[in-house]
Every structure is written in structure tokens, then in C-alpha cells.
Image: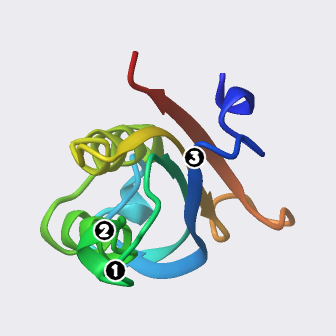
């Protein structure tokens, strides 16, 4: 699904890699009432080719980080998948974005594992 946008000269890939935030996240009792680290990688493909070297001609990285932080700070999510889907839906509202890949890693989820997590994909048809 996303592969049709990768390496396609008509699209620009805009991304943030491994943004670490503190999120109110988790379904288990020991996860409630506290925050835990969540590591996010967000990739979006947009039809942008800036001419005037002006930020309004592209997708601002802050759309990704601000959306993630707003959700993490203001709402508890039981499931990382729900967090990701909500975040992806908000980011995809940007008219310039045609597709996205959104990854969340929970480094404290499984003892002995580097992390657990999920990936969601979006594409406008």
C-alpha cells in the first residue's frame, strides 16, 4: 500500500523518527494512573514541491509531534492501536498528505523485550 509512494518523484516523504513522549496508555491496572514512554515514528507522503522556500508550501513536522503530544497529554488510551489510529486520522486531515505510516513502540510493555507496539497505515484514495 505505502510502497507506491516510496521513491516516487511526485511525492515528498516527510517524517519524524523515534519521537519519545510520555503517554497515558495501557489496559492493565499497573498502567493506569501513570504515564509510560512511547516511541513514535511517523512517515507521510505529500504532494509538495516548495518553490518559495516557505513552510506553508509543505507539511510542518510539528503537525506530527504536536498531534502526538496533545493526545498523550490529554487522554488515556487503553490500546496503543487506538492511540495510533486517532493520531493517524488527525494527521491525515492535512490536505497535502496522501499516505502515512505510523509506528508506536512501548519499551516497558513486555519484560525482556526491547519493545512491543503496532503500526497503522493510511492512504487517501
In this figure, which residue is indicated by the disc labeled 1?
52
The crowd level at tag 1 (other Cα within 10 Å; few <14, some 14-19, many 20+) is: few
Q: Secondary structure at mark 1?
A: loop
What's the residue at 16%, 60% (across, down)? 75
> Which is more toward the observer, 62 or 111?
62
- For residue 92, side relative to residue 49 (left or right): left
Q: Nearer the viewer, mark 1 or mark 2?
A: 1
* Badge 1 vs badge 2, beta-carbon distance below 8 Å: yes
Vertical position of residue 101 compared to residue 29: above or below: above
Vertical position of residue 37 compared to residue 15: above or below: below
Label number found at residue 57 = 2
Label number found at residue 11 = 3
> Which is more toward the observer, 84 or 88?
88
Marks 1 and 2, the one that precedes in the sequence = 1
Q: CA distance from mark 1 to mark 2?
A: 8 Å
Q: Nearer the viewer, mark 3 or mark 1?
A: 1
Q: Secondary structure at mark 2?
A: helix
Label number found at residue 22 = none
Residue 27 visible somewhere in the drawing: yes
Residue 103 visible somewhere in the drawing: no
Q: CA distance from mark 3 to mark 2?
A: 13 Å
Please count the marks in the image.
3
Q: Position of residue 16 (x, y in %)?
A: 55, 72
Q: CA distance from mark 3 to mark 1?
A: 18 Å
Amino acid at each position: 500500500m505505502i510502497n507506491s509512494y516510496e521513491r516516487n518523484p511526485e511525492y515528498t516523504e516527510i517524517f519524524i523518527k523515534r519521537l519519545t513522549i510520555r503517554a497515558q496508555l495501557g489496559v492493565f491496572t499497573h498502567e493506569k494512573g501513570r504515564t509510560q514512554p512511547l516511541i513514535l515514528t511517523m512517515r507521510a507522503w505529500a504532494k509538495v514541491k516548495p518553490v518559495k522556500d516557505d513552510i506553508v508550501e509543505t507539511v510542518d513536522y510539528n503537525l506530527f509531534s504536536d498531534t502526538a503530544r496533545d493526545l498523550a497529554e490529554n487522554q488515556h488510551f487503553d490500546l496503543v492501536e487506538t492511540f495510533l489510529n486517532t493520531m493517524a486520522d488527525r494527521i491525515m486531515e492535512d490536505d497535502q498528505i496522501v499516505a502515512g505510516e505510523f509506528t508506536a513502540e512501548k519499551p516497558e510493555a513486555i519484560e525482556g523485550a526491547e519493545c512491543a507496539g503496532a503500526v497503522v497505515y493510511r492512504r487517501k484514495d
